[in-house]
Structure formats: C-alpha cells, structure tokens
Image: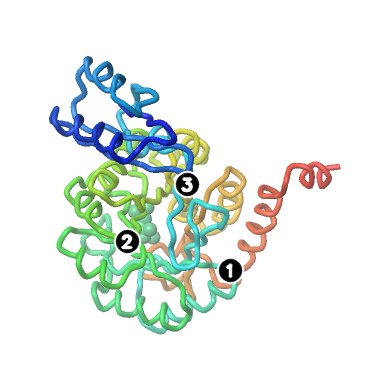
Amino acid sequence: MIVVMKQQASEAEVKSVADHITRVGLKPSISSGSERIVIGILGKIYPELQDELEVLSGVVEVIKVSRPFKLSSREFHPADTVVKVGNVAVGGKDLAVMAGPCSVESEEQVVATAKAVKAAGANIFRGGAFKPRSSPYSFRGLGVEGLKYLAAAREATGLPIITEVLAEKDVEAVYKYADVLQVGARNMQNFTLLDEMGKLDKPVMLKRGLSATIEEWLLAAEYILAGGNPRVILCERGIRTYETYTRNTLDLSAIPVIKKISHLPIVADPSHGTGKWYLVGPMASAAVAAGAHGIMIEVHPTPDTAKSDGAQSLTFANFATVMEQVNAIRAVVSAPKSRAKAASK
Ligand code: PEP
Ligand code: MN
C-alpha cells in the first residue's frame, strides 16, 4: 500500500501519516519526488488501514500495490532512480560501460586492461577479487590482494571500480576498495548478505539469479532498499534455459519489463549472458537498443590464458570494435524522434 500526499503537504502532515503507520506496527518509507511525496508501507497490511489513512490531512489517495515488491516498484517511485558512480549517472542519460577481466590476476593485468578499456570508452572498471566458482578446485580469486590491484587500476585511470562481494565476512574489505559492490547471480537470494548491502552508503549492483523470476529479483532488491540503501542497480546476466549452445539465455525482454515496473537502473551483461566472445558484441548492441542503462563486458589482455571465463572475454581490439557498434546503436536509440525519422528515410 502506498500513500500519495498532496503536492503542498506540510512536514507535519507527512509526519502524522508516518506516525500512524508506525503506531499500527508497520514501517513507513518516505520518498520525496519533485512532483509528489509518496509514503510506502512495509509490513503486513490489514484491510481497514486504507480507510484510516485516507481521512488524514494532506493525503490525496491510498493505493493498494498488488505487487509484492514495493520500494522497487514504479508506483512507489515514479521517477527513474539515478545512481551516481564517479562521473557516471547510471539510470540517467549516460550509458554505463563496465569493462574489465573476469578475475583480477595481477596488478599489470588490471592496470593494462583498465587503460585499454578506458581508451575505448569504458567508464567503470570491473574485476573479480572474490570469485564464485562452480568447482572448488578452480581459481577463486586473489582476495584482498586483488582489491589492492583494483585500487591501483583506479589510481592509474581514474575509473571507478565495481567488484563482487561474495560473503558477509568480506563486506568491510570490499567496501573499503570498491566504488560499487556487486552481488553475483549465485548470491541474489543470500538474504543476510542483502541485509548487509542495505546498511551501506555505496551503490550495489544486484545480478539476476541463475533461475530467478523478475519478481524474485525485485524482491531481492527490496531487501537492500528496505535496509536503507537506495543506490541499487540491477543487472540482467542471463538465465538458465534448456538451450546449451549458449552458457545462459540473455533475457533482453527483462530490460523493458524492469523499466516499466521498476525505477531502478538496469544494466545488461552479455558476457555471462552468452558465454562466447563473438556473441558479446551483438548482444551488447541489442541490450542498448532495448534500453539498457549500461553494459558489463569482460575484457582480458590474452583471453586464451585467462584464469576464468576466457571463452567469453574480449581482447582489447575486439572491445574497441564492440564499443564502436554500441555507440552507433546508442546514437540511433537516443536520437530525438524527428532525427530518427529523418535518418530512416
Ligand atoms: C561476474 O560478474 O564476475 C560473475 C561471476 O557474474 P555472475 O554472478 O553473473 O555469474
Ligand atoms: Mn566471469
């Protein structure tokens, strides 16, 4: 349930609605947009509550939200959420381009890759120091040493860093070095980790779980939002289907769906979404055409020798080519309608 307040509602009116909600054992969550103030109600709603709130001063209407996710819904927050990462407005007009190796392997590797992807147009650097691996015998990352190398890459290029936090015990270390903390697909429903993300004052990128529905994904985001951290970015990274030719099936339709039902920024990861380097370019372009606010792409100096995900990693040269294609698509998608029409003549 959400309470829409009058545009000119006073602080005292907003407070009295919030107090009522608290008094009946529920939690108010106030969102002040430029157009209106909305108060979301978290907890188990009872039927009489709507009538109780509707009569309070300053209230325009009380809307029942049928969706189980509230804070992540468009109803609660009609305007797009824009998450600032360095100079990039993720969810706004900018295209966030997060690029870098799957795993951090050495300082030289990340510094060289950060310089190359920056030159080609990336504006956020990625690299995993704590790696989720299907087999315990695979390379599981350099840990804190890897975080330090990422900091060196930021120092060398000025690019903000996104890196995965795998476990609650690592939150403090990852928070210290990262500009954006990534919660990976396998941890999308690690609810205690999500609770920790809710306590942070840095952006969190939440990847879609391997077999998660869009609703489950938004409910996972809800944990972070309900915990008090509004800086949430979603990332579609492909889901499990019966298809085996590709590693996952990149659900491009999730991009416009998320934009319709949620206000959170949505990024696409065609690297994990396809598993094959030569599919990354077409799917990156397709994601941008579908309206993604950003893309995440794995890039390695020598994909053949990568310690993880070499098959889906781009060389520096291939990444530069993909960026040219993506920029061309972006120019068409973001062109004013009249120009787009003229271009299609
Ligand atoms: C990653 O981005 O490094 C990663 C492991 O991705 P995912 O969680 O989507 O598998
Ligand atoms: Mn990877």
Mark 3 Cα within 10 Å, few/some/many (few <14, many 20+)?
some
Q: Position of residue 16 (x, y in %)?
A: 24, 33
Whole-percent x and y of residue 24? Answer: 14, 27
In the image, residue 105 above or below residue 230: below
* Residue at left offset 54%, top offset 55%: 280
Inter-mark Cα distance, 2 to 3: 33 Å
Residue 220 at least partly seen: yes
Query: Disc 1 marks which residue?
Result: 121
Mark 2 vs mark 3: give the one in front. 2
Residue 1 in the image: above or below residue 89? above
Question: Image quadrant of ligand 2?
Answer: bottom left
- Residue under label 3: 246
Secondary structure category for the residue under label 1 = loop
Residue 141 horizontal/vertical position (percent) = 28, 69
Residue where numbered disc 2 is placed: 202
Mark 2 in CB contact with mark 3 (< 8 angstroms)? no
